[in-house]
Image (cartoon, rainbow, N blue to C red):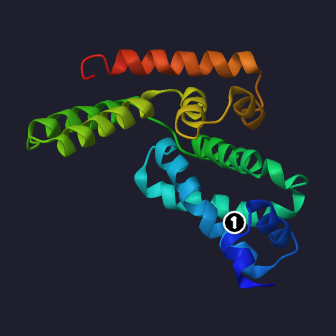
Amino acid sequence: MPSNVYKKGDIETLINLAQNRDSKAIETLIRAEQRHIYAIFSHLADKKEDVADLTQEALIKMIKNIGTLKNPSLFRQWLNRIISNIFYDYVRKNSFSKTEVADDKINEIKDKLGCEPGEKCIFSEIERLIRTALMTLPKNLRLALILREYEGLSYEDISKITNTTLGTVKSRISRARLRLKEELADFI
């Protein structure tokens, strides 16, 4: 197979080759999806040190189960389903304490006072406040909101990924937005 197929090939070609256990296609697919997966988990995981492990687990499951994907055009939806299942497993394994998040939020707000003036500092602080507020959301609200706002998925796709009704997805996203608005009202 010409090497330019791996570099310039569309995702469906890579998936078909990976399904036939082409090691170069598998490697290229991992490189192509690694950042996407890491970005999602960085918004979902309670602890930053867990993001890399969750990402690795998702990549392993992606490659191990790539042969089960019947329609390569649905790859992203299929991958997001793997990510959400891993996230739900992570939630079940790790208890979540709202008091820890509250303490972290207080510390981050205190850090805000030590910032030097400038846009970078402001944007960095806003990003931290949003991330902290996201972590206070219940897991199902957080997942729906991140898939919608950070991944840009449609309500229908989120419904399929989370195995819930369209109405439930809309409700979760609406409630998540409302809670974030309330949580961040003093800052934004």
Question: Between residues 22 and 65, which one lies in front from this camera angle?
Answer: 22
Q: Position of residue 175 (x, y in %)?
A: 54, 16
The residue most toward the bottom is 2
Q: Residues within 10 Å of mark 1 (few under 14, many from 20)?
A: few
User: Could you tell me residue 172's position as x and y percent?
Assistant: 60, 20
Q: In the rendered image of this protein, does residue 75 appear above or below residue 98?
A: below
Q: Residue at x 22, y 32 (%)?
A: 106
| Amino acid on which disc 1 is placed | Ile
Residue where numbered disc 1 is placed = 60
Q: Under tag 1, what secondary structure?
A: helix
- The residue nearer to you, when weighing 167 against 140, is 167
Query: Where in the figure is residue 164, as x and y percent of width and height?
Result: 76, 26
**Residue 177 placement, left or right of 79:** left
**Considering depth in this image, is 151 or 97 the residue closer to the camera?**
151
Task: Tell me how many marks there are.
Answer: 1
Q: Is residue 172 above or below residue 32?
A: above
Considering the image in quadrants, where does the C terminus appear?
Answer: top left
Residue at horizontal 31%, vertical 30%?
102
Q: Is residue 21 shown left or right of residue 143?
A: right
**Residue displayed at 50% across by 61% down:** 52
Q: Position of residue 86 (x, y in %)?
A: 66, 49
Residue 34 appears in which quarter of the rendering? bottom right
Q: Nearer the viewer, residue 183 or 125?
A: 125
Q: Left or right: 18 with respect to 86? A: right
Q: Quadrant of the N terminus?
A: bottom right
> In the visual, does 30 lie left or right of 67?
left
